[in-house]
Amino acid sequence: MPPNAQNTALTLHQAIWNKNDTNWPVCGIPEKFYTDHGSDFTSHHMEQVAIDLKINLMFSKVGVPRGRGKIERFFQTVNQTFLEQLPGYINNNDTPSNLINFHNFEEKLRYFLIEDYNQKEHSTIHTTPISHWNSNHFFPNMPSSLEQLDLLLLEIPKSRKVHSDGIHFQGFRYSNTNLEAYVGEYVLIRYNPNDMAEIRVFYRDEFLCTAICPEIADYSIDIKDIQHARSQRRKHLKQNIASPSTTELIKEEKNCGYSPQETTKNVKKLKRYRND
């Protein structure tokens, strides 16, 4: 994923809000944000986000990493204890058949952070990161609502018409009982490309509701999954092979795909409700 202001904003969005995994309780608006002078961090959008969320942007001197020691040390730990063990790492002499795709990499990294890094004692704090977080007895500074965070960080607005069966978007149907009074009206939707199971709906610049796609509500699906499934379906149709729907292809891949937690307990996820 190339660095840009949008991807940085999505990463910040994911870091700040509550996770859908009960084993990952870390959340909240940071007081300080240490960074370099990359264009994604110095953009007007990121500066405005920092002002709105009251985050103190701390820029290091050009060419001098001082002030970013902790994050640089973390990157080194990730590189040595995680990345070097993966197929495709430089000098690992892996064949193309052994390589993993980006989605598998994300799953492995998530598992490493939650089940490995957060569970090992840290030499500086003399306990595990997750125990340190849980023992501080403080309330993270959170946005007043998820909708406020969406408006600040999700710069992907789209106009859509409300139909009697909901909002049609990316080949899926999103519904919420609050939409019934707006059939025939045009609304603005905002969505996170890393979580396509739900969209935020706004009417005349006011938040209306969160609409859920029932077909994929129990899955973690991003925009790349949808694009890949559509590509597979087009290939099948060109070859005159009977092909399931895009939704069925996505579910099939999710149900049969690799899971880094396959030898451990299942991750508990928070259930989505259409009328939240």
Image: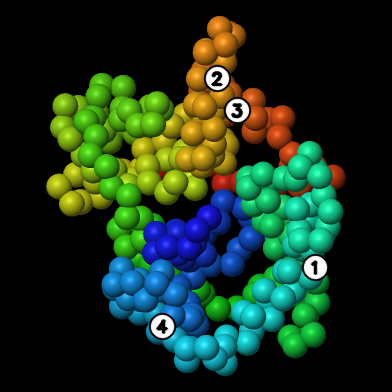
Disc nearest the viewer among 2 and 1: 2
Mark-to-mark CA distance, 3 and 1? 32 Å
Residue type highlighted by circle 2: Lys
**In front: 201, or 86?**
86
Residue type highlighted by circle 4: Leu
Residue 251: assigned label: 3
Residue type highlighted by circle 1: Thr
Q: Which residue is mark 4?
A: 57
Q: Residue at x 74, y 86 (%)?
A: 125
Mark-to-mark CA distance, 2 and 1? 39 Å
Mark-to-mark CA distance, 3 and 4? 41 Å
Q: Which residue is mark 2?
A: 235
Residue 119 seen in this snapshot: no
Nearer-N-terminus badge (4/2): 4
Q: Which residue is mark 1?
A: 81
Q: Is residue 82 left or right of residue 192?
A: right
Q: Residue at x 72, y 69 (%)?
A: 78
**In front: 175, or 72?**
72
Q: Quadrant of residue 180?
A: top left
Residue 111 seen in this snapshot: yes
Element under label 1?
A: helix
